Amino acid sequence: MACLTGLCRLLTLNLCIFVSLFCLLFFPGLGKGQTPALIPVPESLEMGSGTFMLSTQTRFYASNPEVRALIQEQLPFLKSASSPAGATVFFEITPKLSLGREGYDLHISPKSLTLKATQMAGLFYGLQTLRQLLPVSYTASSYPVPALHIRDQPRFGWRGLMLDVSRHFFDKAFVKRYIDQMARYKFNVFHWHLTDDQGWRIEIKSLPKLTQVGAWRVPRTGRWWDIANPESGEVPSYGGFYTQDDIREVVAYAQQRHITVIPEIDMPGHIMSAIAAYPHLTCEQAPAEVPPNGKFYKLKDNTLNPCNESTYAFIDQVFTEVAQLFPAPYIHVGGDEAYKGFWEKCESCRQTMQTHQLKNVEELQSYFIKRVEKIVQSKGKKLIGWDEILEGGLAPDATVMSWHGLRGGIEAAKQNHPVIMTPFQFSYLDLYQGDPAAEPASYGNLKLSTTYTLEPLPDSVDATLVLGGQGNLWTENVPHARHVEYMTWPRAFAIAEILWSPRRKRDFPEFLSRVENHFKRFDEQGVNYARSVYNPFVSVQKHPSGSLEIVLEHEIPGTQLYYTTDNTLPDSYAPLYTQPFLFPKGSDRIKVLAYRAGKPLGRLLEVSLADLEKRAK
């Protein structure tokens, strides 16, 4: 009898171990005594006792046929019940919640699950939360979800990501995949940067050369600043564009996921791809080609002539078709980094400035943007521009997207204009994410922990004028779709949380633990992401003695850094970094490895002496 009892205990213990491992592997959002690893964190979450079992036998009830269709698309293993009596899961649209159009109320007890929202958008976001409580794939027959009560709504109404498809073209299938990823984390704006110097990506039927010529350039690989100019006779074979049917398909796909697609047609600068097709659009009217790089800047005219009526006729043609394709209330017209040197030399520009009493070329750009705004408004849309449109005076009804820090947004808000905060120091996803020795080449550094400190609402600004914010991914150094994902995630997790969750909920170490759970989800889904947060990084300063003083850092609290300077590989028996130290004479490199809880973490970082000297401040 004692032997049988011991056997039972052993079987019970093994079963407990199996269940624990199963939950860790397949339910990464849950842990014993822990709240679920939700991103973005909800406004209010109260944990209950016990779990509710969702299974292929569970029946849900929703009286609204649109809601039923959404549930069957988002949670395909659930079956619909014909009446409330036959269900234990309920989905309801109700105006009584006082949570806004995007808010929701999710209540789970051991006996039932109820999700309520004021509008379909809120129900959709509640479903994204529910999906994060489930395993990454629906292959089992039952899924326990914790008892809890969530009341949730977004802090900001504009929660966006921008994807530049001009520098490199990403096909329709990937754009839809990217939109799917956004929707899971409650983003609601996809800013589509469709045109720039290096490619025109949207079909305009009345101006066919925009895609026949402007969508193609010579093929090049390598770091952006090293890419060579086209050679004589070289065929422009690299590129692509979206047909108008493609655009409609993507827009409809995004709408189903409660994401608004905002098109950007950048002007008056950043438009060499259109000039290559129609050279008469510039002051010089010189033949041009679609460049594979940015080396032409200030040498060739890539700016529309603001003093020629044919320019405005061209813009009207483009925006007529753009407005018909995008139901969004906005058209983004760029307005950034327009080189005005060719305007200063242009006789017609000088005459226009004199006629309209414009003091300088900045006011001439303002004159241009104000005329463009009237065209945009004639299509039933509102104008958005980068913060350079402040220069020379804002167009009367313009919305400003502030990327030079927050100051452009603050200035625009003081002039009573709506603003969207996207400061490059926190939200430019094309910047590398860790130590440059372990990262793909880019312009500068933006760590996950830095992104998480973004505050889009300055104290001095009227909160009603700050629509929200977004992350921007420029793709000069992003040649393919997998790298788009690498550069986007996990920093977009931080942006999603900043724009959705209450400010008081910010806690980077706790956020990081949730991010690591979502890495497991991305692994299962085949989504690429950066693991840079696991890697050490090295900074250098000049010591008064003339030696290099080494500073080692890591984003994750509690991480130990071990290093060598003798060209051997570090492990946990190597010197432990405790404070800055002088780089030894005769050494030609430093190697650093991070440990957490006694285990190696991230990549081995190796930085040469030559690189250290370049970094010295």
Image (cartoon, rainbow, N blue to C red):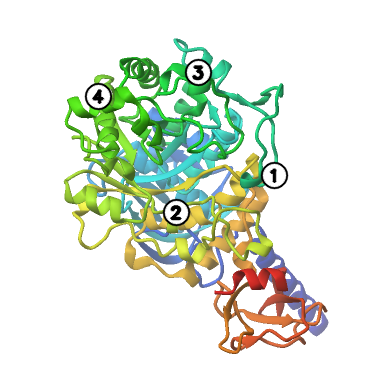
Residue 74 percent coordinates (x, y) = 51, 39
Q: Nearer the viewer, residue 170 or 540?
A: 540
State the residue position of label 1. 222
Q: Tag on residue 278?
A: none
Q: Please determine whether, in this image, residue 130 is positioned above or below residue 9.
A: above
Residue visible at 76% across and 86% down?
A: 574
Q: Is residue 152 left or right of residue 171?
A: left
Q: CA distance from mark 1 to mark 4?
A: 44 Å
State the residue position of label 3. 203
Quick one: SS at disc 1?
Answer: loop
Q: Disc 4 marks which amino acid?
A: Gln
Q: Is residue 377 left or right of residue 82?
A: left
Q: CA distance from mark 2 to mark 1?
A: 24 Å
- Say few, some or many: other residues with alpha carbon within 10 Å of mark 1 (under 14 / 14 to 19 / 20 or more): few
Q: Nearer the viewer, residue 310 or 301?
A: 301
Q: Disc 1 marks which amino acid?
A: Gly
Q: Please determine whether, in this image, residue 542 is positioned above or below residue 406.
A: below
